[in-house]
Amino acid sequence: MLVAALKLKNVFGCFSSYDPDFKIDVSSEEWKQVETLLTYMKYLFDAANMVNAYQYPCANAFFTVVAKIQEELMRAATSEDSFLKLLTTPLLQKFEKYWERCYIVLAIAVVFDLRLKMAMV
């Protein structure tokens, strides 16, 4: 829904001229925030699709996706952008609780996968 709204952001400015009851005025700063939000939602969306795509998802494939999410959340939580920091800090805290419990198992699966061993080193 946000992707479609972002593609049609120019149309939102014209609604008030066609419909006097339309009271929503989205600023350019808010559109930037939507773009930022979509960037980080894409990482979560990709991870969910990877898990749901297979009946039995492999831990070695899942590790790379989850590691990417962790890397991006850490980068965002230390960002200078206050909106980005506000958005990602609670996510990072919840993610860290999950990550602490499973990263060793996922890393071992990657080490045993010969296709990924040299790529990760």
Image (cartoon, grey):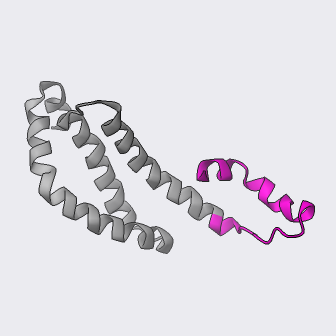
Question: Which image quadrant for residue 63?
Answer: top left
Q: Is 42 situated above or below 16?
A: above
Image label count: 0
* Image x and y of residue 35, in percent: 57, 56
Q: Which residues are magenta?
A: 1-30
* Image x and y of residue 87, in percent: 44, 68
Which residue is at a point 82% across and 67% down the rendered structure image?
22
Which residue is at a point 58% across and 60% down the rendered structure image?
34
Which residue is at a point 84% across and 60% down the rendered structure image?
15
Q: Is residue 61 left or right of residue 81?
A: left
Q: Is residue 3 magenta?
A: yes
- For the C terminus, give its image quadrant: top left
Q: Say whether residue 78 is visible.
A: no
Q: Is residue 100 magenta?
A: no
Secondary structure mainly formed by the magenta segment:
helix
Q: Is residue 70 left or right of residue 97?
A: right
Q: Is 51 situated above or below 116?
A: below
Closer to the camera, 2 or 112?
Answer: 2
In the picture as drawn, the residue positioned furthest to the top comes out as 115
Closer to the camera, 70 or 118?
Answer: 70
* Image x and y of residue 21, in percent: 85, 70
Question: Which image quadrant for residue 119?
Answer: top left
Q: Say whether residue 116 is visible.
A: yes
